[in-house]
Amino acid sequence: MGEIEREGNRLLEDVKRWGQWVLEEAKREIGRFYPPDPDGSIPVGYIWARTVRCQNPGCMAEIPLTLSLLPEMGEPDSRQFLEGSARVALQIDPPFDRYIFIENKLSRCAELESLKNEFPKLSSRISIENNEANLYLHDLCYNKNWKRYWKNKGWSDMALYTQIEWSEVSWNPLTGCTKISAGCKNCYAERMARRLQAMGNSRYSNGFKLTTHEYLLEEPLKLKKPHIIFVNSMSDLFHKDVPVGFIQKVFAIMEKAYWHQFQILTKRSRRMLELNNVLSWPDNVWMGVTVENSDYYQRIDNLRQTGAKLKFISFEPLLGPCPDINLEGIHWVIVGGESGPGCRPVRKDWIIEIRDQCLVHNIPFFFKQWGGTNRKKAGRLLEGKKWDAMPVLSH
């Protein structure tokens, strides 16, 4: 009997050893296609279907639309329950692990809500949306000429409307960046680029390495209706390795697309100032700098010396107090806490201090978010109200 137990244990150890070898070989061969989620879990597969562009800022991901998005959830009846779902979309949304169900019928939303109640483990990963905008997705699912459909809507190949509260559309003729200051530590664009590369998105074949996309330069010209466009949400236009000629091309397009308003945000204010005299600074360009705490006030001074007609400051992520800000020549201020995995907490008194300085100087103040690991739950209310002031445009 003892001999059998010893042999049985040896077999068990062999199975474990060879199983671990297979796992390590699989990780080595194909691991780059399955990067771990922020919580450390590893995806085991991706589902591909007819797609639309992701609505998140500048990611441009191809979002699959399929009849059943959750093929294996550990519950035997889940697949049967989901079969026949008219429209389901996977939204690439930090921390990249949420399933967004797009439904036009309230009755179907109620059914999906009951699914969440039946399988509590899924509740934190599933969101259900029902609104008029979903009619676009409905039409898209059943329209064979879907690319033509989107272009008829005037949306071309740019990202759809961004979820950044202070903008409308993102435009990324440049992707990738490198860290330069404290605010870069938990860069959302880097996390997003890593996942998009693994998903095979051609625009992120270089991952988060700085990459220019010349073929996207004229995209704003295809949007005939006026929009507020965030420029390079996935990069920094004034990165030291971006050719001056490319920056000038971006400015030329912005000047040509005079009916839009373009928002540029940089942490590299020194290079911005160095190039000030070789840039055209059209009236429809809003130039901003990121200031994480009082250590970076020099960026505001550099901004003030540029030829930009509208200048703004983004205190996001706000990582420390910012007293006695020189707001001379500044037309708009944004404040927001850090969000996503590893986010650092923001303090209410830091936000109030900046808000009060803006009120004293009559500068529009925009509070974007409290942040945290669940920024939507944390919300945007400051002292019981939303602060959504935008700069006044002169014509």
Image (spheres, rainbow, N blue to C red):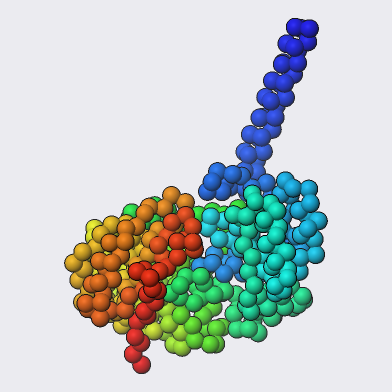
The structure residue drawn at horizontal position 73% and vertical position 68%, both measured from the top left corner, is 108
The structure residue drawn at horizontal position 38% and vertical position 73%, both measured from the top left corner, is 385
Q: Can the viewer see residue 63 in this picture?
A: no
Q: Is residue 16 above or below residue 139?
A: above
The structure residue drawn at horizontal position 72% and vertical position 78%, both measured from the top left corner, is 139
Q: Is residue 181 above or below residue 234?
A: above
**Front-most of residues 248 and 312:** 312
Check the picture and name the quadrant holding the C terminus. bottom left
Q: Can the viewer see residue 75 in this picture?
A: yes
Q: Quadrant of residue 51?
A: bottom right
Check the picture and name the quadrant holding the N terminus. top right
Horizontal and vertical percent position of residue 134: 65, 75
**Front-most of residues 316 and 61:** 316
Horizontal and vertical percent position of residue 383: 34, 69
**Does 182 sit left or right of 28 as displayed?**
left
**Does 171 sit left or right of 151 as displayed?**
left
The structure residue drawn at horizontal position 63% and vertical position 83%, both measured from the top left corner, is 153
Horizontal and vertical percent position of residue 273: 27, 70
